[in-house]
């Protein structure tokens, strides 16, 4: 089988490595991929958002199955375009990807179908939004409606910060058209949990839960990033919480999307907060999370491609999806200055013994050398019986990987360990 994976980051590298385990796979193409994937896939210099060229490539190369991984091409309708040409895909169609593509849509969906989430207001007029933040409770959360590389959410601790956020998003257009509308919502407190799930629109199969670390600095300080590391499973996600989520959030969401004529097939990501009133949805993503994928997929014991094809064929109920009863930790090695300003082009050295533990996110191949080419450069994942051992192994591995200007957090998983001690 010839497989095509659309995307170029650490998440896509994790997907590719897992798909490679299937013995029927003869070739994997990554569009565009990155230099760090060259040993695992054939790199094709086509942007993930260039739908026309992606479709042309798939037809010309007789692709048997495509995985569309990032949010942008999904929201743009990449799956629709491929399926129209008879190419089977993993990923939601455009009308279902809106669950991430528009926060206004997802909030209205939850309100309509009684899915627990934070109280909120929607604004398309900046002045009315500014008027509202004069009297709304603080802290408050301000979200750009559209996609914003995972950075379109601002937690405002004061009214001044709330006003600055509204001006930045709606008037200064920090996130372009994504900020034409905004959601201002209640600030929830409690542990956060990420749950990726396979769904074929009829059943939902949650994967192992995980805990992301969004802030750039230790102890959750600094700016929001795309994610500085993850651990799995998340100790706050107990059996009781999981059962409640299935009953009140997961199944109702799938049913709501079907009811709206937007059947969701693919990976639906539930960003949850375990509040004193029970679990609530912070956000939906229409795809595998990054870097959650880098700890969740290595724990998958079932064949990923088989599961993906069951999602496409709507036979997920008959598919056995198993995860290892172990713990995983992923530490992101980034470029100093990320997520604002950073330099590229430094050589990366990875010991051969660690290549299976590394998922490359931002690197380029030049004259046979792997060079840094992004803010988040790579993720280092280790699996052990205990969470403590997985964290220790990941940091030991990080110590053996080198590139100038490398930066990483030193406390990935510490919050999870503290929970276990409690």
Image (spheres, rainbow, N blue to C red):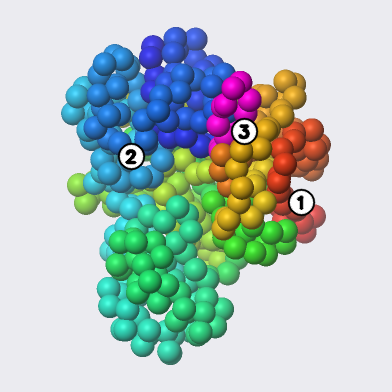
State the SS at label 1.
loop
Which residue is label 2 attached to? Answer: 49
Give how far across and how far down residue 21 sits, in percent.
54, 17
Q: Residues within 10 Å of mark 3 (few under 14, many from 20)?
A: many
Q: Residues within 10 Å of mark 1 (few under 14, many from 20)?
A: few
Segment tinted magenta in the rendering = 360-370
Magenta stretch, main secondary structure, is strand
Residue 44 found in image quarter: top left
| Image position of 280 with respect to 327: above or below | below
Q: Earlier in the sequence, mark 1 or mark 3?
A: 3
Q: Nearer the viewer, residue 323 or 77?
A: 77
Q: Give the crowd class for mark 2: few <14, some 14-19, many >=20 residues within 10 Å.
A: many
Q: Is residue 99 visible?
A: yes
Q: Residue at x 45, y 74 (%)?
A: 165
Residue on which the image places disc 1: 410
Measured in 3D between alpha carbons, the distance from the residue under mark 1 to the one under mark 2, in whole angstroms, is 34 Å
Q: Residue furthest bottom?
A: 135
Quadrant in the picture for the C terminus: bottom right
- Asked if the residues shown at circle 3 and circle 2 are in contact, with their CB atoms under 8 angstroms apart, the answer is no
Q: Nearer the viewer, residue 410 or 304?
A: 410
User: Which of the marked residues, 3 or 2, is nearer the chain's N terminus?
Assistant: 2
Q: Which residue is mark 3?
A: 371
């Amino acid at each position: 089988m010839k497989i095509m994976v659309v995307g170029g980051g650490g998440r896509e590298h994790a997907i590719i490595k897992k798909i490679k385990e299937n013995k029927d796979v003869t070739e994997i193409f990554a569009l565009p991929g990155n230099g760090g994937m060259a040993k695992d896939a054939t790199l094709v210099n086509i942007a993930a958002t260039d739908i026309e060229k992606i479709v042309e490539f798939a037809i010309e190369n007789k692709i048997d199955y495509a995985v569309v991984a990032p949010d942008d091409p999904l929201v743009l309708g990449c799956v629709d375009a491929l399926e129209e040409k008879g190419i089977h895909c993993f990923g939601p169609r455009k009308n279902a990807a809106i669950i991430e593509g528009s926060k206004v849509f997802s909030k209205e969906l939850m309100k309509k179908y009684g899915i627990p989430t934070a109280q909120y207001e929607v604004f398309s007029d900046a002045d009315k939004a500014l008027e509202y933040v004069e009297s709304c409770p603080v802290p408050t959360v301000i979200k750009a409606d559209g996609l914003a590389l995972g950075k379109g959410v601002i937690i405002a601790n004061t009214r001044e910060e709330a006003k600055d956020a509204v001006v930045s998003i709606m008037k200064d257009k920090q996130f372009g058209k994504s900020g034409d509308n905004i959601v201002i919502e209640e600030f929830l407190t409690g542990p956060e949990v990420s749950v990726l799930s396979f769904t074929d629109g009829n059943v939902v199969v949650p994967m192992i839960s995980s805990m992301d670390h969004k802030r750039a600095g230790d102890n959750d300080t600094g700016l929001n990033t795309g994610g500085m590391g993850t651990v799995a499973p998340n100790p706050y996600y107990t059996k009781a919480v999981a059962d409640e989520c299935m009953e009140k959030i997961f199944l109702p969401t799938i049913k709501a999307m079907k009811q709206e004529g937007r059947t969701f097939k693919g990976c639906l990501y539930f960003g949850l907060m375990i509040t004193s009133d029970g679990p609530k949805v912070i956000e939906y993503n229409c795809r595998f999370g990054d870097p959650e994928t880098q700890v969740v997929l290595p724990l998958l014991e079932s064949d990923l491609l088989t599961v993906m094809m069951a999602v496409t064929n709507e036979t997920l109920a008959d598919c056995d999806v198993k995860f290892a009863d172990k713990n995983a930790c992923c530490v992101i090695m980034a470029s100093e200055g990320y997520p604002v300003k950073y330099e590229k082009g430094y050589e990366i050295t990875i010991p051969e013994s660690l290549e299976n533990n590394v998922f490359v996110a931002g690197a380029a191949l030049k004259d046979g050398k792997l060079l840094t080419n992004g803010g988040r450069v790579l993720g280092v994942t280790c699996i052990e019986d205990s969470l403590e051992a997985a964290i220790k192994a990941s940091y030991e591995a990080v110590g053996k990987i080198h590139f100038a200007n490398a930066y990483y957090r030193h406390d990935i998983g510490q919050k999870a360990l503290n929970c276990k001690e409690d």
